[in-house]
Amino acid sequence: MSTTQDIERGSESLKQLRRALFYESQFRNAILSDAVSFYDANITKDSIENEFFFRDEENDFISIPDFIGFSTPCKFSDFIERWCYAMVPDMSQKALRDIPNLRQTLLKVFEEGKREYVLNYWGESVSGKKVYFNHQFLLTKNELDEVCALSIIKDYTQMHAIDDEYMHSELELLAYQDPITQGYNYIKFKEKLKEDGRPGSIICLDIHSFKIINSICGVSKGDEVIKNIWDALLISLDMDKGDLAAHINADHFIIFLPTTDKDVIVHKLKNLSLSLIVISVDLDIPQLQPYFGVSRWDAGKKIEMAYSEAITAKHNAKQQQNVDYAFFDEEDTNRLIREKEMLDSFEEALARKEFKVWFQPKFTPKTKRLVGAEALVRWVKPDGTMISPGEFIPLFERNNIIRKLDEYIFRNVCYYQKKWAESGKTIVPVSVNLSRASLYYKGVTEEYKRITEIIGVDSRMLPIEITESAAITNDAVKKIIDDFHRLGFSLQMDDFGSGYSSLASLNLLHFDTLKLDKSLIDFIGEFGGNRLIEHTISLAKELGINITAEGVETETQVKFLKNIGCDNIQGFFYSKPVPSEDFEKVLDSSVVKENLKTRNDFVEEHIYTFNQNYYKPALYTFIVNLTKDLIVNHTEQENWKNETNILTKSYSQAVSQVTERFISKKSVSAFKKFMDRDNNLKSFFGTQETKILDFQRFFDGRDVDMRIMSHLFKVPNSDDVWLYIKVFCTEPLKLIKN
């Protein structure tokens, strides 16, 4: 018995000795390590066998069990609960949400093959000081196959502060620094501008056709170009005197100059343009063509508004020749007001059916037979005035509402097709344009097919036209085209030759028809232009693609296209776009051919006779359909565009703009009366056909004596009244040029 007791006493003494040695080891390790505390726990048994300590701010060691009111050995889970209660006042911290199940968590972590588990949380030291704890559990198994953990608790307060500062710095860089240029982004630009508060000028900058550089040279080269443009900005601008710049995205930059002096601004922009030429040479890339738009800014104006105005001015610059900058002016403001009015009235106009479908016929040059038409949209206001598609379509595209209009036109064309079929008229395919926004609308193919099924028309009679720029080099488009084909639609690439597509890509995209852009057709008669069109048609034929030529206006063009195998022709030579009621009258191809061709021949012959009788070299000539308020054609087209920047097809709008901008005050009243549409229509029915007006207009900052001759006539088989205008100067032409 005594022997057993001795053995038990010896065993207990051994345990005490081991405990004491471990105590000393823990104490020593606590002193030597950077931990504020560590201990050994048996997770399987849920126990802590030995004493352990906490290092305070004075480097003194305090017994944790004593401090939190219990003694070892104890349960690991009990200790954790007491530790958190004593040392962590805010238990809502995310890192501590699993504390009640920490033992089970550690066992699960070990089973998953992980050997470490870490908690980071805010707590308090024994003195009440706020501490950021790093609580680490190193997991292993003992000789009895029990999961054990060495728990190491460290004070990470200072390190956390450093990490916070670093993170803040990193976040600030992400928030305010452009990743490509390493300079300011748009957010930082706005902050700096508001801080400065000085009035000046906002300038937008982008590079014409920059996407070509990315396509030809690669995206990495494109980023290098962007970085070099930024470096050129830093050199050209004076940042110490308040100049600012930022990279917005792609090839778009924004600049601020604390001045409104146009000469100073232009000087800086020219220097910058020269710097960009150097970049092109240094990097061996296509020459960079910058465009700038300038608007005024002061502290009371939103930066976004000023930037938007600058973009508007930049677009104006792009429309002019040999000009790479433009200033936002009052006319731009008026245009923005008009654009807002159009946007605001869009939904109402849609509901009131102000958008009308017009049709431009397509013919085969061999037989002159009607083979189809293109559906076009016209906006006719309740008072009869017409808004040009060139005015509202780009606006709707920019504001992402074009999709509604696309679908509206498609539905209406479907209804027309059904109506004509039911009335026994000849049915020809009528192609419908699909904008970029509609093209990428999810489910567009199924939606268009559903519309045809509901209305009851054949999708084969409704070809879909997609512009070259929207179709090329986009993998997503191929699927959309394939889906349209699968559902019975045919596909036509519109405006081919206006962009950068290749015939090789057409084989991949499976277009049924290629529509040659008018810009290509205008080259007919030039050796290079003829060869280009011949080559294009030849290769397209090899790929099994039909060809339609757009914008055909002369008999020479028709003959050439016929001889080289062009399938179809669309253009003013046969017919301009006409309203639905006119198109319905001529749906039988024989009627269409004769009526429209006769009309064109008569107009040309009538004008030729008139010119023979009243010969005088004209600066400009215009052919106008007064009844439809439409400028049908004019000569000296490029000069007219460049000089006036008037692109409208509406006769009334063009007259109004010319009067306001170019006619001298002393001549305004007489000019407006002479050109007034209603007066001209009354004059025609009063048998007065030819009139002459002497007037004065502005030319190069001075008044120039001018003369306008107008002639009114009618075309056989039509109720429309036409107007032919000749404008010439009464001074020697050389004086005007000087």
Image (spheres, rainbow, N blue to C red):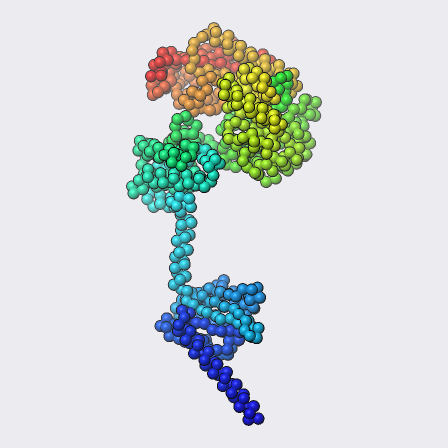
- The foreground one among 713 and 131 is 131
Residue that sits furthest to the bottom in the current view:
2
Position of residue 79 in the picture relative to residue 736 (left or right): right
Count numbered badges in the picture. Answer: 0
Residue 177 at x, y percent in the picture: 40, 47
Foreground pick, 480 / 475: 475
Name the residue nearer the viewer: 474 or 572: 474
Picture quadrant of residue 718: top right
Given residues 729 and 509, the one toward you in this image is 509
Q: Residue furthest left?
A: 241
Q: Residue at x 48, y 81 (%)?
A: 18
Q: Is residue 136 visible?
A: yes
Which percent across, then down, holds residue 262? Answer: 32, 32
Left or right: 481, with 386 as reference point: right
Residue 57, how many percent across, how many down?
37, 71
Q: Is residue 657 visible?
A: no
Residue 702, image quadrant: top left
Q: Residue at x 59, y 32 (%)?
A: 507
Pick the quarter of the image with the N terminus: bottom right
